[in-house]
Amino acid sequence: MIGIFDSGIGGLSVFKEVYRMLPEEHYIYYADSAHCPYGEKSREYVIGRSKEITEFLVREGADIIVVACNTATAAAISVLREGYSDPAKLETAGHLLEISEGRRDHVKFIGMEPAVKPAAGMTRTGVIGVLATAGTLSGTKYRSSRETFTKGIKVVEHVGNGFVELVEKGITEGPEAEMTVEKSIRPLLDAGADVIVLGCTHYPFLIGTIRKIAGNDVKIIDPAPAVARHLADVMKEDGLLRTSPGSDYASGLKPDIRLFSSGNPRILEESFNKLIRR
């Protein structure tokens, strides 16, 4: 079973890509909407929530966990891997066996990768824009990727102010969405960015509005498809797949999808149903 969690419903953008590639797997999705957004919360707070959600997902049957949140990946994934991914550590193995009722002695984590490397290879103007939360932009993983892959490239960063709140309310288009998006992407466009990296899993829900403002000449990079491919590779390597990636229901197996929220479950269910119908 694949466990997926995010600060809210944004991680459904990742679920959509994972589900498209692995349609017959079993899933459990956790939206931490009561504590959303994570972007401006302390690292310690995000780590605490991530550990609590991890243990919930393992207890519910997760064999591998996708941290479908850029902020949580930046703040917590190294701590999660240290605490839950090494079966050679007796304390880790014992705890995991206890909370999984003997099913697993470790669990691997798939995080969100900063997509600055592909962006650097795509730009024609030599300027790329990065939209992300404050927590992601200050994270070690993002800063390391930026320094490694963007030599000779100008990187313009901006927090997507109000983006998460819009998506959590189900507002992804219209005057309010356009006004909010305009304020955050205009500095990137004015600086000459012809590629925009979406550094938060909520932001892909606003792609239509972003494209409307940025125009068709600006490329927008959503890292979710790459995350889905990486997850499939890791699951295949570890023997966790029920079927081959992209099997398109060839085996006749039915997916099992469970949704949990620390906030209003109705909002999560409505967002999920809207997403699946697309």
Image (cartoon, grey):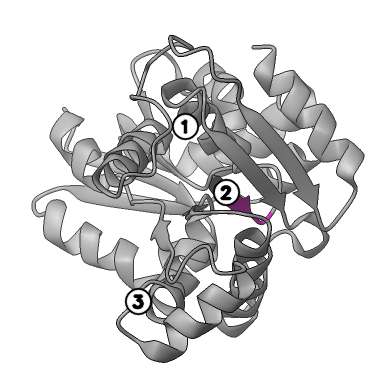
Q: Position of residue 149 (x, y in %)?
A: 14, 52
- What is the span of residues highlighted in magenta in the rendered image? 3-7
Q: Which residue is mark 3?
A: 87
Between residue 157 and residue 94, name the one nearer to us: 94
- Residue 123 located left or right of residue 71: left
Are the residues at dot 2 and dot 3 in contact (C-beta closer than 8 Å)?
no
Q: Nearer the viewer, mark 3 or mark 1?
A: 3
- Residue 100 located left or right of residue 93: right
Report how far apart the C-alphas of labels 3 and 1 lie in the structure: 26 Å
Q: Earlier in the sequence, mark 3 or mark 1?
A: 1
**Amino acid type, mark 1:** Val
Q: Residue at x 68, y 22 (%)?
A: 275
- Where, by quadrant of the figure, is residue 210 drawn? top right
Q: Residues within 10 Å of mark 3 (few under 14, many from 20)?
A: some
Between residue 179 and residue 90, name the one nearer to us: 90
Between residue 179 and residue 144, name the one nearer to us: 144
- Residue 169 located left or right of residue 203: right
Q: Position of residue 154 (x, y in %)?
A: 21, 49
Q: Earlier in the sequence, mark 2 or mark 1?
A: 2
Q: Residue at x 32, y 62 (%)?
A: 142
Q: Which residue is mark 1?
A: 18
